[in-house]
Amino acid sequence: MRELNHLILNLYGSAQECTTGEFQGQALDMLRQALSFDSAAIIAASFSPDMAISLHSLHMYQQPIEKLADRKALVSPDTILADACRSRGRCVTMASAEIDRRYLDLHAYCRKYAIAHSMVLISPATHHANLDLIALWRAGPERAYSAAETELGNLLLPHLTQAQAINSRLFLATDTQPSPGSVRLLASLNGCLQYMEPIAADMLQREWPEWDPPMLPADFVAELRRPGLGRYTGKTLVAQVTELGGYLYIQLAQRPAGRSLTGVESAVARLAATGLSYKDIARQQGVSPATVRNQLHSVYAKLDVGNKTALAAALTVLTEMLP
């Protein structure tokens, strides 16, 4: 028990010390010392009443990313996922040999990715249509999870889920300094999402209506990773990226609507965003307050904003994120 307590403390310590990209792999390395498994995944997803899954983020451990595409192609129902949904907060296990023989594609999938035994936990803390899921897989047919190991999973996996939640909150607070009005997401270098603020999914789907997470659009990743660029400008959004520890830390913001500002409009807009009155701006610009008022009306229309707070946020986007 002393070793397990030490492991749990290390999980929470790593959650506070590691970047979000580093934490998941390191946490699974630690977990593997106490509860043997060959491969794993940490998944955030949602599902429909017919159990169709929409993945939001995914961390693969000792499995290739190609496994994701093969998983999406399956027609047969995922029996262990259904069991895990019915037993939220408790680990469920299953031997692949016990899967209904009629599910030929699922049997082929398990053979291809060396999945002989599965242990799955879905956190009870999330909304009923959402999944915070941890899956641990063993390759050897003779290595079934015992009752004692299942209870060990019941002890340890909720701590992993909680530690990850702490790590994500710290990422939001400190790992990157967001521009006003921006949202953040984290992806591996190949574009597989590891963390995403909820609104980011809506922003990405407006830019790419056919986009399906957790893999970011290939052209988006290529543009962000183009040497010397580190940014993307699209129809509806702008983005900038920082590569850190083998991960992409991405900020998204809505692209301001409307036409470009003239030089005079830009100068007046920036003065207004600092809180200056029409009279103060007019004095600095050498024009009348009525002229300033007309110029700002044009700025508001071009940027599709309605007040100085929104104007300041739009100007920040234009300055920091547009090329």
Image (tube, grey):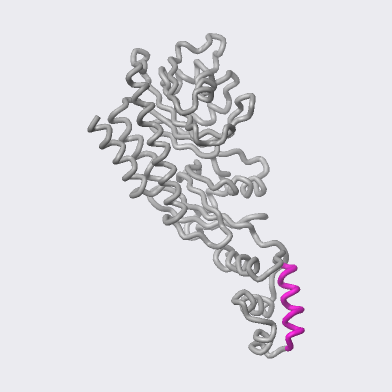
Can you say which quadrant of the picture contains the C terminus? bottom right
Magenta stretch bounds: 288-302
Can you say which quadrant of the picture contains the N terminus? top left
Q: Nearer the viewer, residue 151 or 145?
A: 151
Can you give x and y, in whole percent of width and height, for residue 138 in the image? 37, 21
Instruction: Tell me if 275 is positioned left or right of 59 in this view.
Output: right
Is residue 262 part of the magenta span, yes or no? no
Residue at (54% x, 35% y) in the render: 45
Residue at (51% x, 53% y) in the render: 250
Can you give x and y, in whole percent of width and height, for residue 204 in the image? 61, 47
**Picture quadrant of residue 41:** top left
Residue at (41% x, 46% y) in the render: 167
Most extreme residue toward the left is 2
**Picture quadrant of residue 69:** top right
Is residue 296 part of the magenta span, yes or no? yes
Can you give x and y, in whole percent of width and height, for residue 283 in the image? 66, 89
Instruction: Tell me if 143 is positioned left or right of 253 in this view.
Output: left
Instruction: Decide whether the magenta segment is chiefly helix, strand or loop.
Output: helix
Can you give x and y, in whole percent of width and height, for residue 158 in the image? 41, 33
Task: Note whether residue 232 is visible.
Answer: no
**Picture quadrant of residue 293:** bottom right
The correct choice, above or below, for 209 with respect to 116 in the image is: below
The correct choice, above or below, for 239 with respect to 290 in the image is: above
The correct choice, above or below, for 72 with respect to 319 in the image is: above
Instruction: Tell me if 316 is positioned left or right of 124 in this view.
Output: right
